[in-house]
Amino acid sequence: MEPTDTDILVLPLAQALLTAGSVLALVTVVVLVRRNHLELRYSLLWLLACCAGVGAAVYPESSRIAAHAMGVRFPFNAVFLLVMAFQLAVTFMLTLAASRSRRDRARLAYELARLRLELEDLRARDAAAATRGATAAGSGAPSAE
Amino acid sequence: MFPRRLVIVPAFNEEARIAETVAELRAEAAGWDVLVVNDCSTDGTVAAVRSCGATCLDLPVNLGIGGAMQAGFRWARAHDYDVVVQCDGDGQHPARYVDAVSRPVLAGECDLAIGSRFLNEGGGYRSTPMRRLGIRLLGLLIRALFGRHVTDCTSGFRAINRRLLHDFSHYYPLDYPEPEVCGLVLASGLRVVEVPVTMRQRMGGRSSISELDGALYVVKVGVALVLSRLRTLPE
């Protein structure tokens, strides 16, 4: 007899691999957040995805329930649709962050360039004042400073 | 009171020509201060600018033409300038036209004045045929979207007043800004005037869009123009 979509999802090996993969991903995300390598705000979506993965592995019937709720005939198609939606959400979030970051970068670059210019100006004035002072001291005249 | 006037020269790897451009501005645009914005050049642009004693805003990272111009606008606003002219550092824009380009802005006739190479009957360099076609297409799109004909929307020889200086220091398009700025200014109900100028062929450096496929540039800028129809400059 041909296996159905649901049968494939509940194969013990597939279930074990999905469980192990999801738990590993969950632990990795938590460790990265703890070590400050991943910002908490960007980790929330990944934590949610890992939890969903663990849930789907432990309770395979959930894919059928999700497919039914979404009005999709085959659970596999529902899972693919959810994964694609997740990828789009992550990509959109990243482009938003990149746009904001680019504006911040431009502002910081300007501020740094402005400070450099002001510092050079101050140094030049200092050097000019020191030269004037040295010249005045050499000639015995009172310094202009 | 005499208006404070500034020429901003964005420069990226313009070592060959920048000193000459600054010298020409000083000689032929009397009464104008000059600010060179070095967009993290990898050649001797900064040394060349400093050797001629011009003020140089030296960006620590490459921001592109839009980011470099916005840095210049921020600096101009912080130093209370009344009118700002943008002028390329590669020698394309003759300094003798700085006064002509800024005149309508200083007279209060417009907010943005664009130096157009296509209004001058006297000739001069008018770019390659493919680029001219792209500029024409973008001009037609601007006319369709905003009802105003702009013959040279990609020209980087332009002047703005205090109002736009304020707006651009808060928001300025980062990629291929010139045509999009035309759209944003017109969408905000502000006035644009074109002034005939003669341009020269660039004598050094590289064009900011030379490596881009021209068709892709027109498509990208076209989309940006359509989107600019839906928004105005943030106050």
Image (spheres, rainbow, N blue to C red):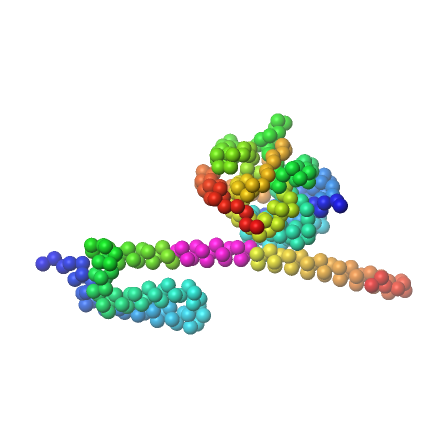
Residue B8, compared with residue A74, is above or below; it is above
Q: Residue furthest top?
A: B121
Front in this rendered view, residue A55 or B214: A55
Relative image position of residue A108 (x, y in whole percent) = 57, 58
Q: Residue at x 55, y 43 (%)?
A: B188
Q: Which quarter shows the N terminus of chain B? A: top right
Residue B195, compared with residue B80, is above or below; it is above
Magenta stretch mostly in which secondary structure? helix
Q: Residue at x 58, y 43 (%)?
A: B205
Front in this rendered view, residue B13 or B132: B132
Relative image position of residue B64 (x, y in whole percent) = 54, 49
- Horizontal side of residue B103 vs A139, given as left or right: left
Q: Residue furthest right?
A: A140
Q: Residue at x 20, y 54 (%)?
A: A73
Image quarter for residue B204?
top right
Residue B152, compared with residue B60, is above or below; it is above
How many numbered dots are placed on residues in this image? 0
Part of the protein shown in magenta: A91-106
Q: Is residue B137 magenta?
A: no
Query: Does the rendering let one see residue B215?
Result: yes
Front in this rendered view, residue B162 or A33: B162
- Horizontal side of residue A8 vs A80, given as left or right: left
- Horizontal side of residue B5 vs A73, given as left or right: right
Relative image position of residue A75 (x, y in whole percent) = 22, 58
Q: Residue at x 68, y 40 (%)?
A: B106
